Image: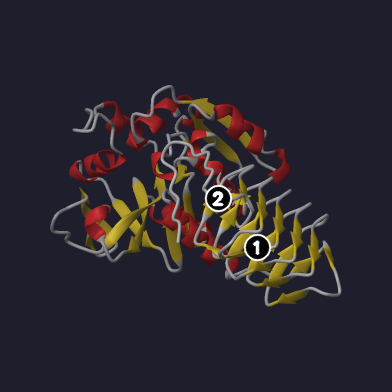
Amino acid sequence: MKALILAGGKGTRLRPITYSMAKQLVPVANKPVVEYGLEALIRAGVKEIGVIVGDTADAVMAALGDGSRWGAEITYIPQPDPLGLAHAVATAKPFLGSSDFVMYLGDNLVKSSLEALIEEFQFHRPSATILLSPVKNPSQFGVAEMDGDCVRRLEEKPAEPRSNLALVGVYIFSSAIHDIIAKLQPSARGEYEITEAIQGLIDQGQVVRSHVVQDWWKDTGTVEAMLEANRLILEDLETKIEGEVDSESRIEGRVSIARGARIVKSVVRGPAIIGSDCLIENSFVGPFTAIDAGTTLRSSEIENSIVLAECHIENAHNRIESSLIGRGAVVRQSDRVPKTLSLVLGDSSQVEIP
């Protein structure tokens, strides 16, 4: 069994963050999203992993390396144009060969063991097994119509869904998928759709099985989804205090403070995670907050937010909440008169001023 992680794409829904970094490298609970999928595959025993990369290839390769720190072997596969998931599989065919393989979308988070999914596939030997999750708004997803455990039909964003089971970004395929993909035509949006390839297997009478997620699944393609994924990951956080906490500070609940971080005259209320070499001074860090390495938070309050590395937040007038703050950002209160706003904002930025 091999694996294919998709780490290309533009990440347009996460702009402006993704103007300067790959969407799969945006951290959730201070760890890049793509690493959660990689680690899940390795725990399931899959060690030969191909990673599809695009414009952000250098950053993805620098983050993941050759896979040796996980005991795996990573092969990078350039996809010059993002022409769809099925096109990514076709691009990776020389790496995949005739092997069965797991395809994992690098911006997805799934709290569900892949071991059981792989075991089911190996026991039943279908042409494909797809991971499904019940959703409240199935018309916004690819939806599966079922016949027992087998998939009868797939529909992409149907106006009248026949079920509430949406396709999660995890699939297992036999080599039979390659012949189907070779005959695909581009869809109306100019892409080679994996849903059409799976439907092609079904139309040929081949067996496509399903596995329903028992816990949760998040596509982290939007700021709101990132914050929700951060909350869900932090729900399982274990307390680990490696940094310094002075006698005038309070740590409440489950909090992780990395080595080199300093908490001075502050309250950190978990679940929350503070990265290495951070300084939290005269501040409040509330639940469901992740602050990445090298950030300074001084005389400010923040909760339910993700702060990337090397930020500087000082004397913020109001509590910051439900925010995603990019690398190296500076947020500070000015004492200048007259009171004015001084903003340097990239494309697609959003600012709310009370």
Quadrant of the rendered image containing residue 175: top left
Amino acid type for the residue under numbered disc 1: Ser
Callout 1 environment at 10 Å: few (<14), some (14 to 19), or many (20+)?
many
Sequence-earlier tag: 2 or 1: 1
Q: Secondary structure under badge 1? A: loop
The residue located at (48%, 28%) in the rendering is: 54
Report the side of 269 relative to 96 (left or right): right
Residue 111 x, y percent position in the rendering:
50, 62
User: Image check: 264 left or right of 214?
Assistant: right
The picture places residue 100, in percent across and down from the top left corner, at 45, 41
Q: Looking at the picture, how far across and down is residue 78, in whole percent?
A: 49, 24
Q: Nearer the viewer, residue 2 or 190?
A: 190
Q: CA distance from mark 2 to mark 1?
A: 22 Å
The residue positioned 34% from the left and 45% from the top of the image is 127
Q: Above or below — where is 201 with respect to 220?
A: above
Q: Which amino acid type is shown beneath numbered disc 2?
A: Pro
- Residue 236 locus on image (x, y percent): 60, 69
From this view, report whether residue 351 is shown above or below residue 240: above
Whether residue 5 is visible, yes or no, is no
Using the image, tell me which numbered label, if any, was put on residue 338.
2
- For the rendered model, the colour scheme is secondary structure
Nearer mark to the viewer, of 2 and 1:
2
Task: Determine whether, in the image, residue 226 is placed left or right of residue 209.
Answer: right
In the rendered view, tell whether residue 58 sits above or below residue 244.
Answer: above
The 10 Å Cα crowd at callout 2, few under 14, some 14 to 19, many 20 or more, is few
Quarter containing the C terminus: bottom left
Query: Which residue, given by chain and number where applicable, does mark 1 sit on?
Result: 300
Out of 215 and 286, give the one closest to the viewer: 286
